[in-house]
Amino acid sequence: MLTLAPPFYTSNILLLASKICSGEYDETPLKFYSDRIRQIIIECLSIDPQRRPDICSVAILCTEQIMLYTDRSCTT
């Protein structure tokens, strides 16, 4: 959702399932984001459920990024 494109896409449902299970996705849209946001996205797309952050962790990480952005905006 953040990249405005689905991470996994194909017109073939079996190939789609294969891509999801193997964690195969196009990382090109990630180049437009900061290292921290990119890391959050990569962690959320991890095929290992233990490596995926829960919603509270994502909210904390996003809040940190928003605060950094607003702090910079207020000082310029």
Image: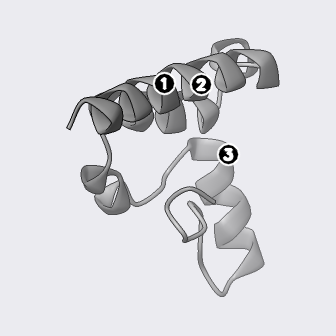
Residue 16 in the image: above or below residue 11: above
- Secondary structure, mark 3, is helix
- In this rendering, would 25 be left or right of 31? right
Residue placed most toward the observer, 4 or 76: 76
What numbered label is drawn on residue 21? 3
Q: Quadrant of residue 62?
A: top right
Q: Answer above or below: position of 23 versus 2.
A: above
Do the numbered discs 1 and 2 sit on residues whose CB atoms are within 8 Å?
yes
Percent from the top left, x then y, of residue 26? 40, 60
Q: Give the residue at the far front of this rendering.
A: 75
Name above or below for residue 11 compared with residue 15: below
| Residue hosting label 1 | 67
The label shown at residue 63 is: 2
Q: Nearer the viewer, residue 64 or 54?
A: 64
Pair 1/2: label in front: 1
Decide which of 72, 20 is in the foreground and name it: 72
| Residue name at image x 74 percent, y 71 percent | 14
Q: Which residue, as the protein is rendered here, is positioned at the far bottom?
A: 11
Q: Position of residue 47 (x, y in %)?
A: 64, 32
Mark 1 to mark 2 CA distance (whole Å): 6 Å
Q: Residue 74: percent from the left, percent from the top?
A: 34, 33
| Residue count near mark 3 (Cα–Cα under 10 Å), binned few <14, some 14–19, many ≥20 | few
**Looking at the image, which residue sits at the far left?**
76
- Tell me the amino acid under the disc marked 1: Met
- Could you classify mark 2 by the number of other residues whose Cα lies within 10 Å: few (under 14), some (14-19), or many (20 or more)? few
Mark 3 or mark 1, which has the lower sequence index? 3
Please state, as top left, top right, bottom left or bottom right, where the N terminus lies in the image: bottom right
The answer to whether residue 58 is above or below residue 42 is above
Amino acid type at mark 2: Thr
Give the side of residue 14 with respect to residue 41, left or right.
right
